[in-house]
Image (cartoon, rainbow, N blue to C red):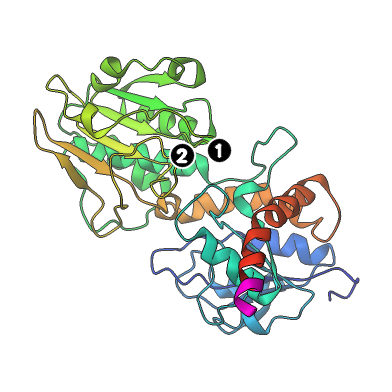
Amino acid sequence: MSPGGRPGLWLRREAGPTELRAPIAPAAARALIAAGIAVTVEDCPRRIFRTEEYAAAGCRIAGPGTWPDAPDDHYVIGLKEPEDDPLPLRHRHLFFGHAYNGQRGAGRLLRRFAAGGGSLLDLEHVTDAAGVRVAAFGHWAGYVGAALAVLRAGGLLDAPLRPMSLPALEAALRRPREPVATALVIGALGRGGRGACDALATAGVATTRWDVEETRDLDRHALLGHDLLVNAVSTAEPAPPFLTTADIADPGRRLRVISDVTCDFTSDRNLLPIYDRPTDWHRPVRRLRAEPVPLDLIAIENLPSLLPREASAAFSADLLPHLMTLGERTPVWLRCQEMFHAAGRPAAAVMEETDV
């Protein structure tokens, strides 16, 4: 417990080798400590913010992977699911669980909480009363996703990908390249869509912007008539797909690069059911079709980590006011708790049956 009787926060190291982001930046850690909330940070040389920056902000520094020993009253925060050792999760955790929309692995994750007695405040569902996320990486996911599509179409995308600064990416978008005439952004009014449009504007690519109204009665002929497609739409309810494998075989297709920012391929609500596995930093592009023109896919699950400093700073600043109220019965956290309990009940029932 923090000196003022408030629950503490434990920022764990991310296990993924390409995950450089942090949900709490040193500036936010300093503000939390000033408010009487103890912050422990695991050492992680890979993180975009140096451990020394957290120490200077007043954080306690712990060894990597020591979060299972965190005090019971602490919230353990990260971005991705923790490592499998230990398998049961006993603390109150904050991370992107991707566990409520039928994604692959969701049941296993929820059973980890059922086994340990812990709970999840899923960062994917930290929302206001209208269901809009109060903190998200969407803008930078959309920006990077669109930027990679432009660079691929223009013959400038090198692999493996490496993290960079925003000025460096902007400079790459302005370099001379093969012509890219038109792009389509679906979900253009959301965070990710706006980010994608910003990147395309930087690159000087004419952009068509679709959102809810334009997708009610989808014009697939118009969609296939663009050079690039950036999908920034996810849905909580089943909906007709934007493209199918039959659509991309259309002999009149002009489309040559798809960047799926949402990357929701494991969900039964996936709006682009034309692939079954993501791409990654080492192999960022997959060829989907060779005819009538080559069609390439970019579907990277941690796009914002390619701009780790900008993405982390923005997300941390948005999340900070809500971290200040952890442990209180605020509407934001109550909604998270209710979603977890509703999703976790079936997993708990499975655990009980197994025990019997």
In the image, taking residue 288 as reference, residue 139 lies left or right, namely: right
In the image, taking residue 78 as reference, residue 175 lies left or right, namely: left
* Residue 269 marker: 2
Which region of the structure is painted magenta? 352-356
Based on the displayed image, in which of its 4 quarters is residue 162 positioned? bottom left
In the image, taking residue 79 as reference, residue 295 lies left or right, namely: left
The x and y percentages for residue 115 are 64, 75
108 and 11: which one is in front? 108
83 and 196: which one is in front? 83
> What amino acid is labelled 2 in the image?
Arg
Q: Secondary structure at mark 1?
A: loop
- Do labels 1 and 2 touch, CB within 8 Å? yes
> What amino acid is labelled 1 in the image?
Ala
In this rendering, the answer to whether 48 lies above or below 264 is: below
Q: How many marks?
A: 2
Is residue 146 shown in magenta? no
- Residue visible at 39% across and 53% down in the picture: 306
Using a 10 Å C-alpha cutoff, classify the residue at mark 2 as few (fewer than 14 neighbours), some (14 to 19) or many (20 or more): many
In the image, taking residue 350 as reference, residue 256 lies left or right, namely: left
Q: Which residue is mark 1?
A: 236
Using a 10 Å C-alpha cutoff, classify the residue at mark 1 as few (fewer than 14 neighbours), some (14 to 19) or many (20 or more): few
- Residue visible at 25% across and 42% down in the picture: 297
Magenta span: predominant SS is helix
Q: Secondary structure at mark 2?
A: loop
The x and y percentages for residue 346 are 64, 59
* Residue 151 marker: none
